[in-house]
Amino acid sequence: MAIGKIHPACKQYLWGGEKLIREYGISSPKTPLAEAWVLSAHPDGDSRISFSDEARFLEGAESSEGAEYSEGAESSEGTKSSKGMESSEGRFFSEGESCSHGESFAEYLKSHPEAVGSLGKAFPFFPTLIKLIDARKALSIQVHPDDSFALSREGQYGKTEMWIVLEREEGAFLYFGFQKDYTEEEIRRAIEEENFPSLLCKVMVEPGDVFFIPAGTVHAIGAGILLAEVQQNSNLTYRVYDYGRKDAQGNTRELHVEKALEVMDRKQLSSYRQEVFKKQGTKAVEEDAAGKSTAGKSTAGKDAAGESAVEEQAAEKNVYLERIGSCEYFTVDRLFLEDNAFYSGKLTKESFLSLLVLEGEGVLTEETKCCEDMHQDGSRECKQEECSSAGKKEQRFVKKGESYFLPAEEGQWSLKGTGKFLLTFLSEKNCVRED
């Protein structure tokens, strides 16, 4: 297989802005652009994936062109989706507004289930969804159910997610959990009296902040925040409070108060949870957990979260790696490259690797093992085309706002450049399911 470029499904909601178009190179037929689903096999916003001859390292030839308006009407701002329906933000989407680049990512995965990796067998669906979100205006205050509730009541899975703040305007904040323990009656009264935000933790944000949001946590993205969201592959949301806003037809938007009250965690967030969910410290990969030099070899790909799909990293100076999130449905590392630095990681058959360029640019290289083992012992005949002892090598020039998918297979990947990059994959201990 080869490096696939992801062309995002785009969502036009009234609270969106234009930064994803202007600053991140996302091509959209309409504005405002609220969300770009940069890795999605969800029916409400299926990304597209392309493999072309242009992938053979044509520097600057590729752009983030081609966005898709999904058939789904509701996003993280609503509970349901269906073709051609009105969105949760009061805007109508036609069914035919799709990009012409590549094929459906969902269909690609159906044809190539091995691309997800062996750890993906724990799930009945592709487990992860990644978005870029531009909140020019505040989103509704909302909560997501867990899998147990969602499967029993909605016939679909719940939603756990995490946010990585990329940009923020002066004074921007988000809502995250309750200030103290509240009873259901107190919460219901605050909603009825339109005073619900006063119960919540108002958190000022800075670029680089990371928030992990388990199902059941009340939350909302505030105005003036642009972030990356890595989440469980679900589009199920219960809207609790919406500032009395109306849709494009002048109707008050639907709330889902009763269901929200059933699933929300009403307890105060402890200092421990706040600390864990906020930004983690940057750590050079040249140092292990004890602060000892590893001579350019990183151990950051292995930790309490389990074996990483990017294990056995080799790096030079000016390379930094953070483990910023891990749950049942995904593991996320943030990679910093300075002064055209080089970073290398191992590909395995256990997991795919998603690379999202948050800032800067670089050259992404994939070199599969192909028949390396066969050539070493000379006892087996290679049947693959274009085979060599060095394996198959492919390079892509990548830049800000672009998303790439590396299928699960044996080999190496590397990145040389300057910028910030989000690495998402599956790790063994995070894929143990109880259902």
Image (tube, helix red, strand yellow):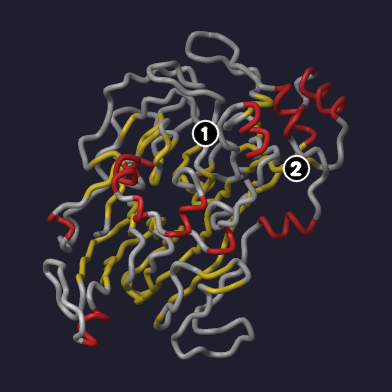
Looking at the image, residue 24 sits to the left or right of residue 212; the answer is left
Where in the figure is residue 404, as x and y percent of width and height?
33, 55
Tell me what residue is drawn at x 43 percent, y 16 percent.
85
Circles 2 and 1 in contact, beta carbons < 8 Å: no
Q: Is residue 362 above or below residue 39?
A: below
Where in the figure is residue 13, as x and y percent of width and height?
45, 27
Where in the figure is residue 321, as x and y percent of width and height?
50, 71
Where in the figure is residue 346, as x and y percent of width and height?
38, 73
Sort mark 2 into few (<14), some (14-19) or many (20+) by Cα contacts within 10 Å: some
Residue 30 falls in which quadrant of the image?
A: top left
Q: Of 346 and 398, which appears nearest the observer?
A: 346
Tell me what residue is drawn at x 67 percent, y 55 percent.
277
Say which label, 2 or 1, has the lower sequence index: 2
Residue 431 falls in which quadrant of the image?
A: bottom right
Residue designated by label 2:
201
Give the Cα distance between marks 2 and 1: 24 Å
Q: Is residue 256 above or below residue 114?
A: above
Looking at the image, residue 336 sits to the left or right of residue 178; the answer is left
Query: Is label 1 in a helix, a strand or a loop?
Result: loop
Residue designated by label 1:
235
Q: Is residue 362 visible?
A: yes
**Hey, what amino acid is under mark 1?**
Asn
Q: Is residue 417 above or below residue 92?
A: below
Eye-nearest disc, 2 or 1? 1
